[in-house]
Amino acid sequence: MRKAIPFLATVLCGLLAASGAYAAKGKSSSTVGKTYKWVDENGVTHYGDTVPQEYSQREQQVLNAQGVEVQKRQAEMSASEAAAYATKQKEEALRRQHDMFLISTYPSVAEIENVRDARLDQINGQIGASEAYIATLTTRVDRLKQRSMGYAPYKAGARRMPDDLAEEMVRTLSELRTQNSALAQRRSELQKVVDQFDADIKRFKELRTSASARLNDGNTRKK
C-alpha cells in the first residue's frame, strides 16, 4: 500500500501539469491574432497588441487576424460631452420623426403649399383684425388727449383733470400697448410659419429625390 502512494502522487502531478498547460494554451489562443486600433491626440492612427495606458479611455477597435473589426469600445465622455451627445441624439431622433411626418402626411409639394397658404391666411386675418382694433384704439387715445388739453397741467389755470378721464386715458393706453405687442408676436409667428414651410418643402424634395434614387438603383440592380 505504501508503494502505491508515490505512483498516485506522480499521476496527480501529471494531471495538474496538463491542466495548467491546457489553460495556458486556451488563454493564448483567445488573444492570438488580436490587434488594437486607436487614434492619438494628433489624429494619428496606431495599431498594437495592447493599448497604452494614456489612450485607454479613447475609442478603440479590436481587429482579428484578417484585419476585420470584431469589437469596438466607445471613448469615455465627460459630463459636458455626454450632455452634448445626448442633445445631438435627441435632435437626430426629432429630425427622423419629422421626416417620417412629411413623407407620410403630404403626397406632393403642392399639398404642403396648400396647408401653408391656409395657415398664412389665418394668421393674416388675425393681423388684419389686430391692426383694425389698434387703429380704433389710436383714434380713441387721440380724442382723449384732445379732451385732456383743457385741464391742468396741460392748460394753465384750468381745473384738475376729472378722474374718469384720467382712468380712461390710462386704460386705453395700456390696451394699445398690449395690442401692439400682440400684433408684433403675430407678425413674428407669420415669418416663422413661412420659414418652417420653406424648410419643410426643401426637406420633402430631398427625401423624395433620395427615395427615387434608391428605387432607380434597386431597379438597375435587378436588371
Image (cartoon, rainbow, N blue to C red):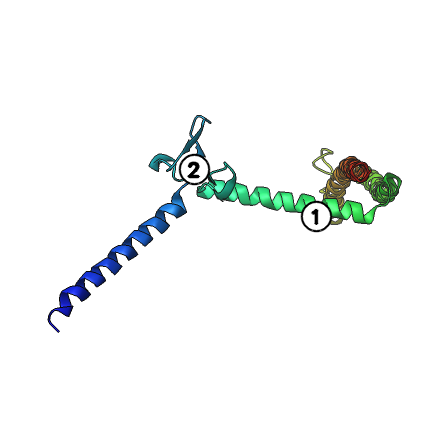
Dividing the picture into quadrants, the one containing residue 33 is top left
Residue under the image location 79 percent in, 45 percent down:
103
| 166 sits to left or right of 61 | right
Find disc 2 in the rendering and name its residue.
36
- Give neighbour class at mark 2: few <14, some 14-19, many 20+ (Cα, 10 Å): some
Residue 171 visible within the image: no
Q: Amino acid at mark 1?
A: Gln
Residue furthest to the bottom in view is: 1
Q: Is residue 68 above or below residue 13?
A: above
Question: Quick one: 86 or 158, which is closer to the camera?
Answer: 86
Residue 109, given in percent of the width and then of the height, sits at: 85, 39
Find disc 1 in the rendering and name its residue.
97
Residue under the image location 71 percent in, 38 percent down:
152
Residue furthest to the left in view is: 2
**Quarter of the image where the N terminus is located:** bottom left
Question: Quick one: 211 or 139, which is closer to the camera?
Answer: 211
| 103 sits to left or right of 121 | left
Mark earlier in primary sequence (2, 1): 2
Question: Quick one: 212 or 46, which is closer to the camera?
Answer: 46
Residue 156, given in percent of the width and then of the height, sits at: 72, 33
Give the SS element for disc 1. Answer: helix
